[in-house]
Amino acid sequence: MTESGAQAKLLERLSSRIRDAWRSDPLYIDPIIVPGLTDSQKAAVERASEQAARSGLAHFIAIMPPMPNSEEATWSRFTSELAYAMHQNNSEEQTVVLFSQADDAARSYAYLVDANGPAAPPGSDFLARSSSDDFLPVELAVPYQMQILIAAANGTEPPAPPDFDTREPGDSGGDYIDALGLEKGNPDLVVFGTTAAAALGLSVWLLRRRTKYSWRNSLTSKRDPVRSEQLPDRVVSALEPLPEPHHPSEEMWTLRDRGRRAQEAIRVLIEAHPDWAVSADFSHRYGIENLVSTHKWIRARLRGSSKADPEVPRFCFLFPHHRGKIEKFALKQQGTTLSVDMCESCRDEINAGHEPERLMVPKRPGSKKPIPYYQRTDVYALSGFGSFQPLEDAVLESMGSPSTSSRGGQG
Ligand SMILES: [Zn+2]
């Protein structure tokens, strides 16, 4: 067996051991290091786990033996994959997962996981260090990092970071809690001071994150195609009869048939949602925009316009008004991976561990609860605005009359 093969096997075994242990207790301490931990170290990490449980968040903590530096990349991938797997196993919106290596100092891997995968607060490795660039000892690092993760998950202010004195802790056997009297209360209140830069950096990051993710808490209402694209006027001209192909061919007649299907789908949508242009549910506006754009392209092709793009318009799965550099992308969702069309900027965001904005619509008609449109079961979700099937096909199949839905396949 190769060295990397052997290592993969080891990590696989470690992964299943941790997952087995987490089934009965969200706090896992590797048996190898249990004898090396002091009582107050154990108590501190147990308290951190209890505190997380009280916050109501799904959480998992693993205290591990130290890993050699050279394996940092492997270890980082291992921990993030395990964190994501734990999230996929529960039905919670967010899961916090912390891996901390217990040694004389603790190197930590902290993850806040949601449907888009694990996000590590930027600089969280730095946050595991003191101002003198030492890693925080496990009894300080674990409670502190759990508080950061909980604050990040709830969008509240992060705790002030603990600092610890890197001078010898004296006769306490290397246990900072004993040495500093930290067992008497919240470590944050009694430690020497705060690492101001780290606290500031994290607050700024959290604030930005909160602003950045504020779209999650409200229905989409920005970038209204009814106004920005004079959609009602464009609907009127889109419904005018299609021309015959300028250069007749099998392909052009098929295209024309698709154009008529798009027109029919526009009529069906408008009839089913007469308030589409004023509705709080923006999926209808983007649905109409999708059909009108497809139709416009078909009309240009039929006319033989030299300016018409050879490819049919494509729409970003997450937010159909994103149209730049769309490519297929494997989007991880709870328990599955979807192959969808996605714009360059959303792909970049996801690859950087962020959650790009998406089209948020009412959970049910009239409801105030915003959910991503694709979590419903309507024609927009079924089609993914073109990622799964052309919207006109989804509309005609589920909302059209039998005569419209039996007319031909995709163009
Ligand atoms: Zn996008």
Image (cartoon, helix red, strand yellow):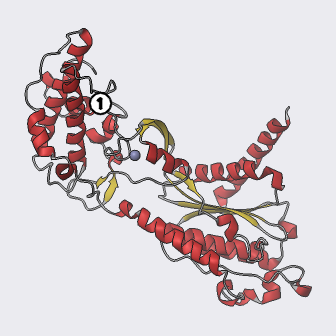
User: In terms of secondary structure, where does tag 1 sit?
Assistant: loop
**Quadrant of the image containing the N terminus:** top right
Query: Who's the residue at 53% across and 53% down the image?
Result: 90
Q: Is 288 positioned to the left or the right of 350 in the image?
A: left
- In the current view of this chain or complex, which residue is farthest to the front? 306
Query: Who's the residue at 63% across and 77% down the image?
Result: 197
Query: Who's the residue at 22% across and 17% down the image?
Result: 408
Specify the quadrant of the image occupied by residue 95.
bottom right
- In the current view of this chain or complex, which residue is farthest to the top? 249
- The crowd level at tag 1 (other Cα within 10 Å; few <14, some 14-19, many 20+) is many
Identify residue type, mark 1: Pro
Kindly tell me whether residue 354 is visible in this rendering. yes
Query: Toward the viewer: 389 or 134?
Result: 134
**Quadrant of the image containing the C terminus:** top left
Query: Toward the viewer: 80 or 249?
Result: 249
Query: Who's the residue at 22% across and 41% down the image?
Result: 289
Q: Position of residue 84 (x, y in %)?
A: 59, 51
Check the image and report above or below for 162 versus 306.
below
Specify the quadrant of the image occupied by residue 177.
bottom right
Q: Is 70 positioned to the left or the right of 55 in the image?
A: right
Q: Position of residue 14 (x, y in %)?
A: 76, 49
Specify the quadrant of the image occupied by residue 388.
top left
Kindly tell me whether residue 17 is visible in this rendering. no
Q: Position of residue 20 (x, y in %)?
A: 69, 52
Q: Position of residue 151 (x, y in %)?
A: 53, 72
Query: Toward the viewer: 408 or 29?
Result: 408
Count of marks placed on residues: 1
Check the image and report above or below for 132 versus 186.
above
- The residue that label 1 is drawn on is 390
